[in-house]
Amino acid sequence: MRYLISILATALMIASPVMAKEPSEKAEAANVKSMELGQQLYLHDQAAWHGTDALAETVDMSAQNDLRGYVVEPLDNGNLGLVFFAEDQEGHHEFARYEVAGSKVIGGGVHDAETRVALSPMLESIVAARTAAIEEFKKQEWGFCTRSSANFIGLPPDEDGVIKIYLLTSTTEENSYPFGGHYRFDVTPDGKVKSSRKFTNSCLTMGLEDGPEGQKPYALGVSHVLDKHPTEIHYFQSYYIPARVFVIIDGDAWVLNKGKYEKIEEM
């Protein structure tokens, strides 16, 4: 295991034969939950990314003074609805709406000037939860790890009505992946921050470059000390990183590959 950690720390291109310790039942259950959240984060991020591109092709974003942001909601067909909302004297209303399937915008556009669609109560609750999360973020005196605009993801209420709000450091360089500067806020139905957390103790940005003669890296290694299992941020990043992600926790190696967990077997 020490040999694996050494190899990952020096970013070698070939994995070593090792046997990972069997995760505890509690850690495995938490790991599965992290996988599910990581997939949600990825799909919401894809919807925001590609929907924003679609909107920018239609309007001058800098000229939309009433535009306040976006929220995402699940649709009955399994796709996601991306809603850009504006504000007037009557409150928030939809400025544009897009339907996104995975990484592809398949419909939608800017609403007619005569059409006013108020935000649904559920979307309003996410907007309110984001406001509460930002206030808590400021109170904690946390910060991001790049100078570019942070990313926002708000998941729909869970079975207890709790809304998870994520404020994420954005990627600014190709082949550079920030694991630090990400935060989660759990907001109750009455708009109170129930709990909040950071996912690392400091900024941690990992690079991934091709090896000699264009060899593609097998894995990117990162150590983690705040949890006994990979977090949703590790899984979220694994969708974007073109290699396996080895998360080293207490000497154990967790291998993440495009949002899935794999055990390392002895070779």
Image (tube, rainbow, N blue to C red):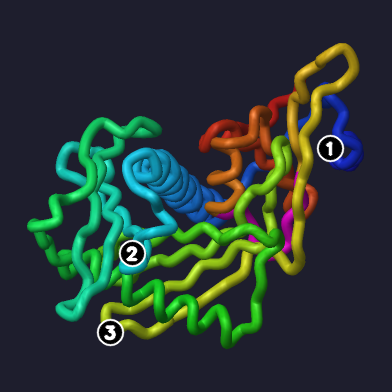
Question: Alpha carbon of mark 3 to alpha carbon of mark 2: how far?
Answer: 25 Å
| Image coordinates for residue 23, horizontal then vertical, percent | 62, 47
| Image coordinates for residue 113, horizontal then vertical, percent | 14, 56
Q: Earlier in the sequence, mark 2 or mark 1?
A: 1
Residue 178 part of the magenta segment:
no
User: What is the magenta range?
Assistant: 222-231
Q: Secondary structure at mark 3?
A: loop
Disc 3: which residue = 190
Which residue is painted at 26% across and 31% down in the image?
106
Looking at numbered disc 1 in the image, what kind of residue is underneath it?
Answer: Leu
Q: Secondary structure at mark 1?
A: helix
Looking at numbered disc 3 in the image, what kind of residue is underneath it?
Answer: Asp
Which of the 4 image quadrants contains residue 198?
Answer: bottom right
Quick check: can you spot residue 25? no
Looking at numbered disc 2 in the image, what kind of residue is underneath it?
Answer: Leu
Disc 1: which residue = 8
Task: Give the foreground label among 1 and 3.
Answer: 3
Q: Earlier in the sequence, mark 1 or mark 3?
A: 1
| Image coordinates for residue 196, horizontal then vertical, percent | 52, 76
Question: Alpha carbon of mark 2 to alpha carbon of mark 1: how far?
Answer: 44 Å
Q: Earlier in the sequence, mark 3 or mark 2?
A: 2
Disc 2: which residue = 67
Tell me if mark 1 has few (under 14), some (14-19) or many (20+) residues whose alpha carbon lies within 10 angstroms of its own.
many
Tell me if mark 2 has few (under 14), some (14-19) or many (20+) residues whose alpha carbon lies within 10 angstroms of its own.
some
